[in-house]
Image (cartoon, rainbow, N blue to C red):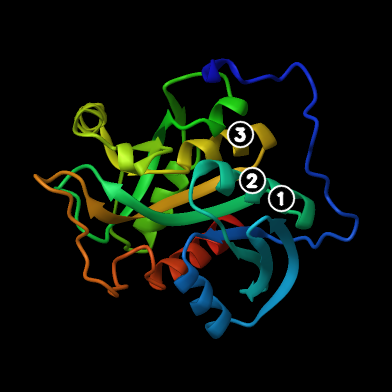
Amino acid sequence: MIVDSFDNKSEAKINPKLKENAPIVDACIVTFSNIIEKYVLENYNCKQIGQFKFVTGITPIYQINYNDKKFAFYKTYVGAPACVGTIEDTLSEIKTDKYIVFGGCGCLNKEITHGKVMIPTEAYRDEGTSYHYAPASDYIRVKNADIVAKFMEENGIPFVKGKTWTTDSFYRETVNNFEKHKADGCISVEMECSGIQAMCDFRNINLYIFFTSGDLLDAPKWNRRHKEGELTGTQHDSGHFDIALELADYVTD
């Protein structure tokens, strides 16, 4: 069974291997948004310092200098397998032990304000990737949630903490599953958190993750909660990159 997939008794056939000339950076910032990637390239002095290849093409890794620090930045793919795979690939291209990941999520509680930063404290493992990096359990603890929350509080950024539900299949977020996870205390649903945290624990990497509240599931009918092309308060809001950059600065002091 998939929940029995974790094997720490034998070596993996393929492993990331850091290149001899891999640049050292203070942290790596990861986005899912092509619009935010475009914003960063247009508004920051970026230079390419690495890349990795998927069958879909080449993904560049950039460097941004900020407050006398060096931060890597790249756009990842949606879903735990691809997102975890890209972080694993960066372990060959750059040297760092801190990753700041931010993206959108579905909201499971209508009392949560649209656009408020959501900080996961635990992630329900309704995906397959994490079971290859950690022993089976219902939840995995998001270890640095308190650090992220402290940063938000000190900077006056509205936020809420709570459990998240990580799923592989957003088209199968059924009513019964929604009600079960909401009753269990989950305030958000997304597709990567439990997989990323399990991988980071396995590789001894520090993960700092936050979400932007997007569509609303806690309603009689699914609600996108934003108009077509609207960016403010969504996962494409460039202001959330600015938050991620300041968070990277904060955790590397």
Res 131 seen here: yes
Residue pointed to by mark 3: 201
Return the residue nearer the eye: 199 or 55: 55
Q: Which mark is residue 89?
A: 1
Rounded to the nearest whole Å, what is the CA distance between mark 1 and mark 2? 6 Å
Rounded to the nearest whole Å, what is the CA distance between mark 3 and mark 2? 15 Å
Q: Is residue 85 left or right of residue 234?
A: right
Q: Residue at x 55, y 45 (%)?
A: 207
Q: Earlier in the sequence, mark 3 or mark 2?
A: 2
Q: Is residue 21 left or right of residue 115?
A: right
Going by the numbered disc 2, the residue's amino acid type is Gly
Going by the numbered disc 3, the residue's amino acid type is Asp
Q: Are marks 1 and 2 in contact (CB under 8 Å)?
A: yes
Percent from the top left, x then y, of residue 189?
33, 42
**Quadrant the N terminus occupies:** top right
Which class describes the residues within 10 Å of circle 3: few (<14), some (14-19), or many (20+)?
some
Q: Residue at x 40, y 33 (%)?
A: 122
Q: Are marks 3 and 1 in contact (CB under 8 Å)?
A: no
**Quadrant the C terminus occupies:** bottom right
Give the secondary structure at mark 2: helix
Q: Residue at x 53, y 84 (%)?
A: 43
Q: Is residue 141 left or right of residue 13?
A: left
Q: Earlier in the sequence, mark 3 or mark 1?
A: 1
Percent from the top left, x then y, of residue 77?
53, 55
Q: Residue at x 42, y 52 (%)?
A: 210
Q: Which mark is residue 186?
A: none
Q: Which mark is residue 85?
A: 2
Camera-side mark, 3 or 2 = 2
Going by the numbered disc 1, the residue's amino acid type is Asp
